[in-house]
Amino acid sequence: MDIRGTDHIELYVGDARQAAFYFGTAVGFQLRGQGGPETGLAGQRSLLLTHADIRMVLTTGLTAAHPAAEYVRRHGDGIAVVALEVDDAAGAYAELVARGATGVSRPRTWTGAHAEVVTAEVGGFGDVLHRLVERRGDRDGFLPGGIEVTAPAAAQRPLLAEIDHLAVCVPPGQLAETVRYYERVFDFAQIFTEHIEVAGQAMNSTVVQSPSGRVTLVLLEPDATRRPGQIDAFLAEHHGAGVQHLGLRTDDIVTAVGALGERGVRFAGTPGSYYDALEERVGPVDAPLERLRDLNILVDSDHGGQLLQIFTESVHVRRTLFLELIERRGARTFGSGNIKALYEAKERELAAAAAVPQGVTA
Ligand code: FE2
């Protein structure tokens, strides 16, 4: 199974134009194209946004029966498709289905003047699908005859580089079978596994990765024997398994967080005391600590080096999907501090939200 990387992600949202305004104005994505009934995509409006090598499709169902409308009704806005770049979509589809994947959409060829794209879809986790994407010719064609590119990429210094990983919450008892599914069907390998306990709450985490190393899923399962925490809250609000956060890699997190913050992106706060003990925990950090403290940027380390990371507050009413920015400085795996830092940061956010008196908008 030759999965080369993530081709794009697709979010199903209540209003694609509103969501595009957030991802465009605040996060720095550029609106590049669209599709809908006029291009043969009946019952939906889809907008294509890009930033460096990150491609995101925002889709809204125009009828109640459209899968995007069904998804949003059940889960709220969220990542519904993780599209995988393959050499042979029809071959990959046949192989995945033979190995036990649920076939969702059979191979289809999209033909344009300069590009030909073959897609097919299989089940992933929860209601999230994997779209297999095979591109021939002009890579900028996206989905000829479906989602057409209408604007060239603007010259800009990218703040974000690529998708680093997706964090996925699964219900209690489903982590092992989800890991096995990705190993057996997609040839992914376990690269890390851990039991994490924080303040009477606990979760299990296993990271699975494609053989290319370019698709990484951080799978999270609550420990049902302990006090409910943020993974349980996600599963309840999202109504089942789904993508909790999208990790976006940046080459310069200090500049990226500063710029996104000025544009209105809200990041999770970090207690000041975190920075007092930081270098004791991770060693010397090659960045001004005061700047990291001002911006609430977290640091962690593993055997390969360090990583800097930060999490946005969710912009969704259900407080489900949020973003992570991550700058890797040698750290390639997920040190325990990564997930613990997320867990603790999110718990603080939930505790702060719970402390807001009724009738006050948080
Ligand atoms: Fe993450």
Image: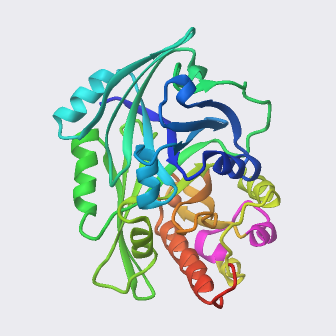
Q: Is residue 309 visible?
A: yes
Examine the structure image and report whether residue 282 is included in the region drawn in magenta: yes
Quarter the N terminus occupies: top left
Name above or below for residue 319 compared with residue 141: below
Residue occupying image coordinates x 63% and y 89%: 358
Examine the structure image and report whether residue 237 is included in the region drawn in magenta: no
Q: Nearer the viewer, residue 293 or 346?
A: 346
Tally of numbered discs: 0
- Quarter-wise, where is residue 154 in the image? top right
Residue 46 percent coordinates (x, y): 56, 37
Residue 182 percent coordinates (x, y): 28, 47
Residue 312 percent coordinates (x, y): 64, 64
Residue occupying image coordinates x 57% and y 15%: 138
Residue occupying image coordinates x 27% and y 55%: 178
Name above or below for residue 241 compared with residue 118: below
- Quarter-wise, where is residue 168 in the image? bottom left
Task: Specify start and end residues of the magenta stretch as a single range.
Answer: 278-295
Residue 317 percent coordinates (x, y): 57, 68
Q: Nearer the viewer, residue 321 or 215?
A: 321
| Magenta-drawn stretch, dominant element (helix, strand or loop) | helix
